[in-house]
Image (cartoon, rainbow, N blue to C red):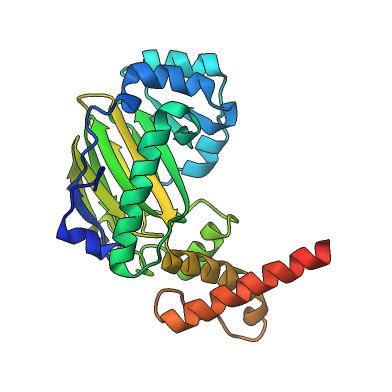
Amino acid sequence: MRCFRDEACLDLLDRQTFKFQHQLMDHPALSLQNLANVLPALPADSVMSSKGLLSNGDDFEDVMCGNTGSRFAIEAVIENIRTSDSYIMVNGPEAHPSFQPLYRELIADVEQIMKRRGLGNAAISPKLYLFIASPNSVTPFHIDRYSGFLMQFRGSKHVSIFPQWDERVVSSQNKEAYVANKNTRLPWDHNMNELGKTFEFHPGEALHIPFSAGHHVRNGSEDVSISMSIFFSTDQSHAWRQALRFNHAARPVLRRLGLKPAAVGRAQWRDSAKSGAWTAIRKLKSLRGS
């Protein structure tokens, strides 16, 4: 593999979280000089930022998506990010030519891992997210709607990751609403930290965050943090996402009957059936709309 060191733990994709080594240190696409050129060239709504330190309990998506600043403001933030308590999230840096080779190599590695696990041959909707953050910045507790690998290039982090299907961390109802994009503020209690595992995360290291596994991040105090994730779906995680959306739509109907949908992630045959049903419902709605 070109981007990841081939380690046995890679076979745990979407079963549990794990840390391993990546092979992308000093990649020219990720230098601050290149980033200062790339970010202004991307569409303005691809570059999201926040001023001031966030904390667990904040609605991460709402804060970031509500702050798509001007190109000039983003450039100024990069120049002063060490002391500005700022957080930049870049959606899809692969749109810039300087990221295209890295993007293709990461996809190739992901697909090799997927094939070994029997989770399909092609990564579904792969996308890069780039994160540039001041020292001590916090990424609030949230879940991702995809499987992902997080890679660190500069600075350090403490990353706390929680079991993906533990109802004590995120209830089925909250997870369904989050994946359906209906509610992105998840309940948080600091006592939940006892349920997770915290990793010290340094340049050259990578973390696998399984589909929908809750997590939060605190950057180290010594330097600006630069990290990047590749998000993607496998055949399995795509079915999970579709099944969660099906449950979200079915829940109010079943509630009137005194019932609730069976939780996703417990029976593959049931998740596949719900995924198929959701796909059929969406196609029917599309035909009616046309």
Badge count:
0
Location of the C terminus by quadrant is bottom right
Above or below, 46 against 194 in this view is above
Q: Is residue 34 left or right of residue 48?
A: left
- The answer to whether residue 14 shows anywhere in this view is no
Quarter of the image where one finds residue 14: bottom left
- The answer to whether residue 37 shows anywhere in this view is yes
Residue 132 vs residue 136, the one in the foreground: 132
Q: Is residue 276 left or right of residue 11?
A: right
Residue 280 vs residue 190, the one in the foreground: 280
Q: Is residue 14 left or right of residue 122?
A: left
Quarter of the image where one finds residue 81: top left
Q: Residue at x 43, y 56 (%)?
A: 123
Q: Is residue 11 left or right of residue 91?
A: left
Q: Residue at x 24, y 38 (%)?
A: 157
Residue 10 vs residue 138, the one in the foreground: 10
Pinpoint residue 31: horizontal percent, then vertical percent. Answer: 31, 22
Q: Residue at x 41, y 49 (%)?
A: 231
Pinpoint residue 91: horizontal percent, then vertical percent. Answer: 49, 37
Pinpoint residue 76: horizontal percent, then vertical percent. Answer: 45, 13
Q: Residue at x 52, y 57 (%)?
A: 178
Quarter of the image where one finds residue 228: top left
Pinpoint residue 256: horizontal percent, then vertical percent. Answer: 67, 81
Above or below, 57 against 9 in this view is above
